[in-house]
Image (spheres, rainbow, N blue to C red):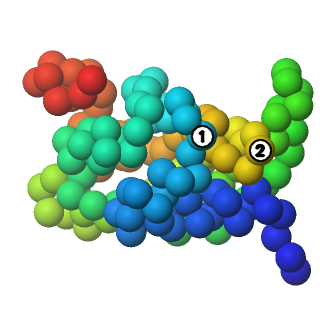
Amino acid sequence: MERAPEVEIVDTYLRLFGEKDLEAASAYLAPGAKLVFPGGLTFDDLPSVVADASHRYKWVQKDRTDFFVGERTSDGAVSCISSGALKGETLWGTSFAGVRYIDLFILRDGLIHEQYVWNDLSELGVTPLLAQRLSVGAAR
């Protein structure tokens, strides 16, 4: 079955980002893209995302299992949802797997303009809670 172009864009972007090929992954982002992570942390570039992640875990990978494509009703932009599970290693050296995630992407003209990330890493104690990270000045 042929996948929608938006699925190919999102899947390739996530794969490249997971491989830490930030330059190639950034080519899928529109200028001024908004990247929103758990706790409402907002970034506008991938190096900033990676720098913040270093305060949450040693490494993480997404097992991307499902994609959904639709239309955002407020403005007609194409939306693509990626969902699956996270695996990786905590700051303390403990492995984790099977942690659910969902990412919502808003695309226009073949580029990602917005990314919204939700996952259960903090809820499961895999990463420090945002309040803990803010209290030590690690988050922005």
For the C terminus, the image quarter is top left
- Which residue is nearer to you in this view: 120 or 135? 135
Residue 120 seen anywhere in this rendered image of the structure: yes
Q: Residue at x 16, y 53 (%)?
A: 91
Which label was assigned to residue 30? 1
Q: Which residue is mark 2?
A: 109
Specify the amino acid type for callout 1: Ala
Q: Give how far across and how far down residue 30 sits, in percent.
A: 60, 40
Q: Residue at x 59, y 66 (%)?
A: 12
User: Dot 1, how many residues are within 10 Å of its Cα: few (below 14), some (14-19), or many (20+)?
Assistant: some
User: Does residue 133 sit above or below 49 in this rendering?
Assistant: above
Q: Earlier in the sequence, mark 1 or mark 2?
A: 1
Q: Residue at x 43, y 27 (%)?
A: 42
Q: Are marks 1 and 2 in contact (CB under 8 Å)?
A: yes
- Which residue is nearer to you in this view: 16 or 125? 16
Residue 105 seen anywhere in this rendered image of the structure: no
- In the image, 138: left or right of 26? left
Q: Give how far across and how far down residue 1 sits, in percent.
A: 88, 80
Q: Give how far across and how far down residue 55 sits, in percent.
A: 20, 42
- In the image, 60: left or right of 119? left
Specify the amino acid type for callout 2: Asp
Q: Give how far across and how far down residue 89 sits, in percent.
A: 25, 63
